[in-house]
Amino acid sequence: MLEQIKFTTADIHKQTNNFKPEIGIILGTGLGGLVKEIKIEHSLPYEKIAHFPLSTVEGHSGKLIFGTLGGKKIVAMQGRFHYYEGYTMQEVTFPVRVMKFLGIKTLFLSNASGGVNPAFEVGEIMIINDHINLFPNPLIGRNDNELGTRFPEMSEAYDKALIHKAKEIAKRNNIKVSEGVYAGLTGPTLETPAEYNYMRAIGADAVGMSTVPEVIVARHMGLPCFAISICTDLGVPGKIEKTTHEDVQRVASTQEPKMTLIMKTLISEI
C-alpha cells in the first residue's frame, strides 16, 4: 500500500504543479457546497487519479479540489468512499493516506447522520467529540511503521481545541450546535427502530455510514481531526419517519450554509 500511496502522491503533484495543501477536507452527502467557497486552482476527477476509487453515491460528485479557503491552502474531497459500496476499508481510507503524504497537517470532515439523541431536532448540527466504531477496523493487517504505530492511541480522536474554537465561532454567529458521539455503521440500510434504540443505549447521539474509518486512519498518522454532522432524520421513538436518500440530501443542503460558515471560519483561525 505504501508504494501505491507514494505513486498516487507523485501523480497528483504532477497534475497540480506540486501544490502543497496544509488542510484536508472530506465533504459528505449533500454537503459539497463548501467547494463554492474555495478559490480553486486545480480540480481532479477521481478517475484521473492513479489508484483512486470512484464514488458511486448520489450527492458525491467525485473530485479532488485544490485551492485556498480561509487563507489556507487546502485539498478537499468532493465526495467520499464508503464500505457499503464494496470497497475494502483500506480503499475507503486510501485518500486520507494520500492527503497526509501531500502535506496536510489537519483533517476536517463532514457527514449527514441520523440523530438518536431525544433532545435533537431534524437538521441538528452536531460537532463530533467521540465515536463508536462498528466497522471492521481499517488498521487490521500488517502495520507499516512509516504510516503509523501498530497500536494508535484514540483517547482524543477529535481535537478538543478545534471543538472549543468551533463552538465559539457558532456562538458568535448565532448558530445552534450540539456536541456528541457518532456511531459508524456499515450501511447501506438505514437503521431499524430497534437498532436506533441500541445505538442510543450504547452511548451514541447520531449514527452514520462514514467518517469513523477516515478518522482512525488519520489518527494513525498523527493528524488532528475535526468533524461535524448534520442530523437529517431522527431515530427517536415517536419521531421516526420513513426516510429516503433524497430526504437526507434535502435537509443537509438546507443546513449546509451554517456548517460551511463554521468550517471556513475555523480553518481561517487555526
Image (cartoon, rainbow, N blue to C red):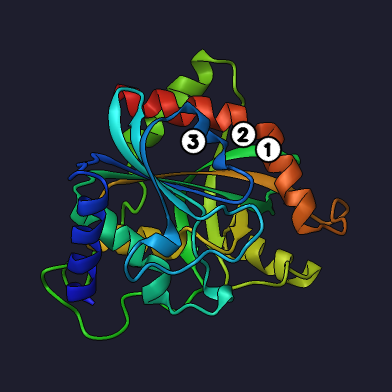
Q: Earlier in the sequence, mark 2 or mark 3?
A: 3
Outermost residue to the bottom:
141
Q: Amino acid at mark 2?
A: Glu
Q: Quadrant of residue 241?
A: bottom right
Disc 3 target residue: 35
Q: Answer left or right for 250 relative to 182.
A: right
- Residue 65 spot, x, y in % from top left: 40, 43
Label 1 residue SS: helix
Tell me the tag on residue 253. 1
Q: Amino acid at mark 3?
A: Val
Residue drawn at x 49%, y 67% as measured from the top left? 54
Q: Answer left or right for 6 relative to 42.
A: left
- For label 3, count other residues whose C-alpha is less than 10 Å away and answer few (under 14), some (14-19) or many (20+): some
In this picture, is 122 found above or below 218? above
Residue drawn at x 78%, y 52% as measured from the top left? 246
Tell me the tag on residue 256. 2
Whether residue 131 appears in this view of the structure is yes
Q: Nearer the viewer, residue 114 or 180?
A: 114
Classify the position of the C terminus by image quarter: top left
In this picture, is 51 found above or below 34? below
Q: Nearer the viewer, residue 84 or 49?
A: 49
Whether residue 235 appears in this view of the structure is no
Q: Amino acid at mark 1?
A: Ser
Label 2 residue SS: helix
Label 3 residue SS: helix
